[in-house]
């Protein structure tokens, strides 16, 4: 008989995984998650941003058929889309999903595509949070490229954390910028082309600017507002997923 998953039981599971495996090296965490913990019920979410090549390269070393979920918001830099295509081809990833916003929602709420100027939170919800919930709903767990050093809001980021009835895994949580740079050099990985122009955290074009010297990597996001996260890593996603149980998502 299958054990019924609840948010409480998954939270306990995430804490146990963190205590037992949270200090492993990223490659070991990825191999453990893909080959032993979650098998075919795990994916990776990638923004194909400044340092995305590191996590994707590590995953490709374990299993190139791992599903890759990319939120195609319709507002990305053209350079990001080219980088996505080139990196996927170079790494030989074979199961890439481009996740789009619901066209009916955009038609009703953002017919002119200018909501990022008037309501950034709602724009992120329509273009990222809701699509993200749909994308990860079929999986038991997913991996991200988030790291503790990226911003003050991420300094306590664990490797394993619960999001409702699912587990989110951050294999690179403990790596710093020097670790990432060394790995990219060692493995001849191409940086996102906009990094050379000062973009250290790259999201949608209307809400991303270059970073000035001394600022944290995410300071170029949503400049001039109090916003620090798009919402896919905050409670908005948990709330959205609470309406999609693992049983429902696999029907």
Image: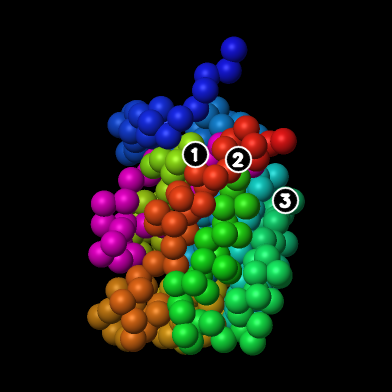
Nearest to viewer (mark 3 / mark 2): 2
- Mark drawn on residue 166: 1
Residue at image point 35% right, 70% down: 228
User: Which of pointers 3 and 2 lies earlier in the amino acid sequence?
Assistant: 3
Which residues fall within the magenta stretch?
A: 138-160
Residue at image point 54% right, 45% down: 243
Q: CA distance from mark 1 to mark 2?
A: 8 Å
Residue ID for mark 3: 95
Q: CA distance from mark 3 to mark 2?
A: 14 Å
Label 1 SS = strand
Query: The C terminus is located in which quarter?
Result: top right
User: Which of pointers 1 and 2 lies earlier in the amino acid sequence?
Assistant: 2
Badge 2 density bin: few <14, some 14–19, many ≥20, Cα 10 Å? some
Question: Which residue is farthest top?
Answer: 1
Residue ID for mark 2: 139
Above or below — where is 23 with respect to 226?
A: above
Magenta-colored stretch includes residue 35: no
In this orientation, which residue lies closer to the viewer: 190 or 218?
218
Badge 3 density bin: few <14, some 14–19, many ≥20, Cα 10 Å? few
Q: Where is residue 173 shown, x and y percent of the image? A: 36, 51
Tags 1 and 2 in contact by the CB under 8 Å rule?
A: yes
């Amino acid at each position: 008989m299958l054990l019924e998953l609840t948010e409480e039981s998954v939270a306990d599971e995430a804490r146990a995984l963190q205590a037992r495996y949270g200090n492993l090296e990223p490659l070991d965490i990825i191999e453990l998650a893909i080959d032993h913990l979650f098998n075919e019920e795990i994916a990776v979410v990638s923004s194909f941003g400044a340092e995305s090549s590191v996590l994707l390269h590590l995953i490709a070393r374990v299993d190139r058929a791992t599903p890759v979920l990319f939120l195609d918001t319709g507002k990305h830099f053209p350079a990001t889309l080219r980088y996505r295509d080139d990196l996927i081809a170079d790494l030989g990833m074979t199961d890439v999903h481009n996740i789009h916003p619901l066209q009916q929602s955009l038609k009703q709420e953002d017919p002119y595509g200018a909501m990022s100027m008037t309501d950034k939170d709602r724009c992120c919800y329509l273009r990222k949070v809701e699509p993200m919930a749909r994308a990860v709903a079929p999986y038991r767990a997913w991996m991200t490229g988030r790291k503790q050093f990226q911003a003050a809001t991420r300094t306590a980021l664990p490797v394993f954390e619960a999001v409702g009835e699912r587990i989110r895994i951050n294999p690179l949580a403990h790596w710093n910028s020097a670790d990432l740079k060394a790995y990219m050099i060692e493995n001849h990985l191409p940086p996102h082309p906009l990094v050379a122009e000062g973009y250290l955290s790259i999201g949608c074009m209307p809400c991303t600017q270059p970073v000035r010297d001394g600022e944290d990597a995410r300071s170029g996001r949503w400049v001039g507002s109090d916003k620090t996260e798009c919402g896919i890593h905050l409670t908005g996603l948990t709330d959205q997923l609470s309406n999609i149980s693992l049983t429902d998502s696999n029907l």
